[in-house]
Image (cartoon, rainbow, N blue to C red):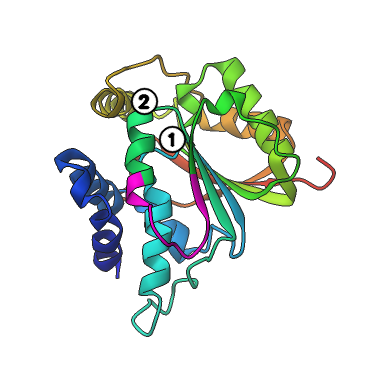
Amino acid sequence: MVNALVRDASLRYRHAGHFPYHFARFKLRRDPVFRIALAAGLIPDGARILDLGCGQGLLAAWLLASQRRHGPAWPAHWHPPPRPRALVGIELTGADVALARAALAGPTEWPIDIVQGDIRAMPDGAGAYDHVVMLDVLHYLDYAGQEAVLRRVRSSLAPHGSVLLRVGDAGAGLQARYSQAVDRTVQWLRARRATPLYCRRAGDWRTLLAGHGFAVREIPLPADAHGANVLMVAQRAAGA
């Protein structure tokens, strides 16, 4: 099933050029977070989703592929694929926005809107979203920017809304330094820029999220996943 999903989702980028297509294939096949999000039901069904730092729209393409592949061959131990009510993606890099819009153009099972902008300046949504996704995003922002984004995310979430996020553990030693080098390389390949990284230890990320009104649980990653990454679901706490 994973191979079929990778093929269906990456085909959307075939006419965009060599790099976007092969990047989609590589990322969707090698990064376990996409498979885990489906298998473990980490994205709620019927949710209004906000994908921050959405890149070329891989999450949206993956979810569309899952809807079209759902059937008798769907793995019995996986959750049914979620059908969002709508998905909004925000991405800073104009080239990625153009790729995402082209790949996701045409009739889709739910409304998809890809917006170019800085997530630190996104408008307060006042409960406009049920689920926010931030995969490998926060460490590209300085510490004040991280705080600003989390304040806006919290205010944009409906009561009991949730956040799926992946962060790097700066305390992971050599694995952390390797991960940071990879992040800078990918950033240069995709956006022709490399900005400083503002990393924290895993415990400090959890403290930061708790301080912004989130109850955090960690999602186990497979043994062969990158050791410096931590996958978390942060639930907006009651009254926060």
Task: Tell me what residue is drawn at x 53 percent, y 56 percent.
Answer: 111
**Residue positioned most to the left:** 18
Tag on residue 170? Answer: none
Q: How many callouts does the rendering have?
A: 2
Q: Is residue 130 left or right of residue 11?
A: right
State which mark lies toward you, 2 or 1.
Answer: 1
Name the residue located 70 percent from the left edge and 40 percent from the top edge: 156
Between 213 and 19, the one nearer to me in the picture: 19
Q: Earlier in the sequence, mark 2 or mark 1?
A: 1
Query: Does residue 222 appear in the picture of this structure?
Result: no
Corner quadrant of residue 64: bottom left
Q: How far apart are marks 2 and 1 (CA)?
A: 18 Å
> Which residue is under mark 2?
173
The three-letter amino acid code for the residue at tag 1 is Asp
Circle 2: is it few (<14), some (14-19), or many (20+) Cα within 10 Å? few
Q: In which quarter of the image is residue 76?
A: bottom left
Question: Where's residue 102, x and y in %?
Answer: 33, 46
- In the picture shown, does residue 95 fall above or below 234? above
Element marked by disc 2? loop
Residue numbers of the magenta segment = 102-113
Name which residue lies at 31% across and 17% down: 193
**In the picture, which quadrant includes the C terminus?**
top right
Screen quadrant of the N terminus = bottom left
Q: Residue furthest front?
A: 106
Query: Magenta includes 226?
Result: no
Residue to which mark 1 is pinned:
136
Residue 218, percent from left and from top = 55, 47
Q: Which of 178 and 98 is in front in this view?
A: 98
- Could you tell me residue 85's position as x and y percent? 59, 60
